[in-house]
Image (tube, rainbow, N blue to C red):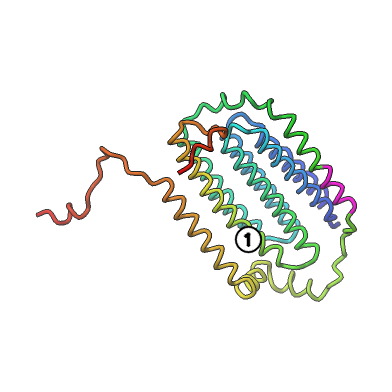
């Protein structure tokens, strides 16, 4: 039953990610990207990563996809003209993609990975039944990976400052209220 | 019934290849190139989570956490660059993006 659900979800992921790169309208691409993230979060639930499934929904669907939608809304572009040259790059893309696909499939098929039927039962009991997934991640993230956690916060701060600095502009002739002038007037 | 890890790996390989072909195919449209990069990062995340489940080691999920934050930062800065590029050039054609120097 689980493997049946897995096949349904993976077929949906592949279909929607093909539609992301092939659809004519970029808004449809963003919506299909949201569907890909939903199905991937279901896939994360199969792998016992409940916290990451929810974080994937919050971060990608709530933040990144909305950011994409805002940017598409602000750009005034006739997107249908851009699709004309799609077929020019199709042979090169298919060639490179096919070669890399074959190489990666060869690597995975030659690997010796089999599913281990939970040989470490003690860890299994401790981690997956008494503590839940969020508590384990918190216990390790704030102790062992504390500096990396701080560093990722710093990277997000730098990205925020960079995005604001890049898109800030002063236009002439815009009516703005001057707060100091407003307060200090009689 | 457990799912074998190779199924996850094959799925992540297919998603990675779709993202790679998407970068090649949508040469004119920078936004869809950024979305293809998100697909590639997502395939890496699928790999991390499935191996974290396989080895019963939580470090893979921690790295997915960092990966998410880096992907969000990359999307924010990339979209800001797209916005200023469109403001200067009135297009998001990737062939003349090298005029954005200075």
In the displayed structure, B1 sits above or below B39; it is below
In the displayed structure, B22 sits above or below A130; it is above
Residue on which disc 1 sits: B65
Residue A88: quadrant of the picture: top right
Which residue occupies the foreground of this view, B64 or A81?
Answer: A81
Dot 1 falls on a residue whose secondary structure is helix
Kindly identify the residue that appears in the image at 87 percent across and 64 percent down: A116
Kindly identify the residue that appears in the image at 84 percent across and 57 percent down: B2
Q: Which residues are magenta?
A: A102-110
Kindly identify the residue that appears in the image at 52 percent across and 49 percent down: B76
Residue A127 place in picture, x, y as percent: 73, 72
Which residue occupies the foreground of this view, A167 or B68?
Answer: A167
Q: Quadrant of the C terminus of chain B?
A: top left
Residue A46: quadrant of the picture: bottom right
Quick check: B52 left or right of B29? right
Residue B93 place in picture, x, y as percent: 55, 32
Q: Quadrant of the N terminus of chain B?
A: bottom right
């Amino acid at each position: 039953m689980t493997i049946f659900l897995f096949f349904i979800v993976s077929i949906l992921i592949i279909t929607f990610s093909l539609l992301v790169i092939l659809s004519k309208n970029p808004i449809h691409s963003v919506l299909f990207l949201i569907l890909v993230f939903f199905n991937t979060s279901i896939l994360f639930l199969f792998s016992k990563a409940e916290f990451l499934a929810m974080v994937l929904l919050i971060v990608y669907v709530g933040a990144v996809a909305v950011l994409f939608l805002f940017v598409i809304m602000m750009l005034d572009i006739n997107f249908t003209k851009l699709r004309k040259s799609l077929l020019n790059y199709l042979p090169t893309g298919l060639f490179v993609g096919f070669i890399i696909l074959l190489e990666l499939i060869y690597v995975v098929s030659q690997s010796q990975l089999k599913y281990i039927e939970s040989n470490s039962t003690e860890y299994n009991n401790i981690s997956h039944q008494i503590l839940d997934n969020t508590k384990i991640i918190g216990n390790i993230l704030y102790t062992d990976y504390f500096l990396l956690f701080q560093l990722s916060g710093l990277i997000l701060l730098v990205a925020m400052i960079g995005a604001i600095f890049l898109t800030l502009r002063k236009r002439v002739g815009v009516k703005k209220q001057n707060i100091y002038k407003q307060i200090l007037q009689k | 019934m457990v799912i074998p890890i190779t199924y996850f790996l094959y799925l992540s390989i297919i998603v990675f290849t779709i993202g790679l072909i998407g970068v090649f195919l949508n040469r004119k449209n920078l936004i869809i190139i950024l979305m293809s990069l998100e697909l590639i990062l997502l395939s890496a995340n699928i790999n991390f989570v499935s191996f974290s489940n396989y080895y019963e080691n939580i470090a893979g999920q921690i790295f997915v956490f960092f990966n998410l934050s880096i992907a969000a930062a990359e999307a924010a800065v990339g979209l800001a660059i797209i916005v200023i590029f469109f403001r200067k050039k009135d297009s998001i054609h990737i062939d003349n993006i090298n005029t954005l120097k200075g």
